[in-house]
Image (cartoon, rainbow, N blue to C red):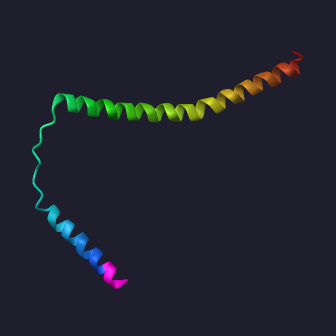
Amino acid sequence: MKRHRSSALIICMAVFLLSFFARNAEAYIGPGTGLTAIGAFLALIVGVLVAIFGFVWYPVKRLLRKNKRRSKSEDGG
């Protein structure tokens, strides 16, 4: 068990020390790639919001319909 911990510690220290020597990538992202990334990110956000809305709205809608039917039957409808 100690051997596993020491090797994990050595690996973590090596990654930490190597991160100080990292250089900038200086990579170019073209307009097509940038717009695609922005579109994918916006689609992800909209998808999450629609999913949350669906999980909230449909049970509320069902509850409102149920209450509406109940009030009609109580009124003698």
Depth order, front residue of 72/54: 54
User: Does the segment drawn in magenta span residue 3?
Assistant: yes
The answer to which image quadrant residue 44 occupies is top left
- In the displayed structure, 76 sits above or below 23; it is above
Q: Quadrant of the N terminus?
A: bottom left
Looking at this view, name the residue that lies furthest to the top: 77
Depth order, front residue of 68/33: 33
Q: Quadrant of the C terminus?
A: top right
Horizontal placement of 39 versus 23: left or right?
Answer: right
The answer to which image quadrant residue 32 occupies is top left
The residue depicted at 82 percent of the width and 25 percent of the height is 70
Q: How many marks?
A: 0
**Magenta span: helix, strand or loop, mainly?**
helix
Residue 10 spot, x, y in % from top left: 23, 75
Residue 41 spot, x, y in % from top left: 33, 35
The residue depicted at 76 percent of the width and 27 percent of the height is 66
Looking at this view, name the residue that lies furthest to the right: 76
The residue depicted at 47 percent of the width and 33 percent of the height is 49
Looking at this view, name the residue that lies furthest to the bottom: 2
Horizontal placement of 27 versus 4: left or right?
Answer: left
The answer to which image quadrant residue 47 occupies is top left
Residue 67 spot, x, y in % from top left: 76, 26
Magenta stretch in the rendered image: 1-5
The residue depicted at 83 percent of the width and 19 percent of the height is 72
- In the displayed structure, 26 sits above or below 60; it is below
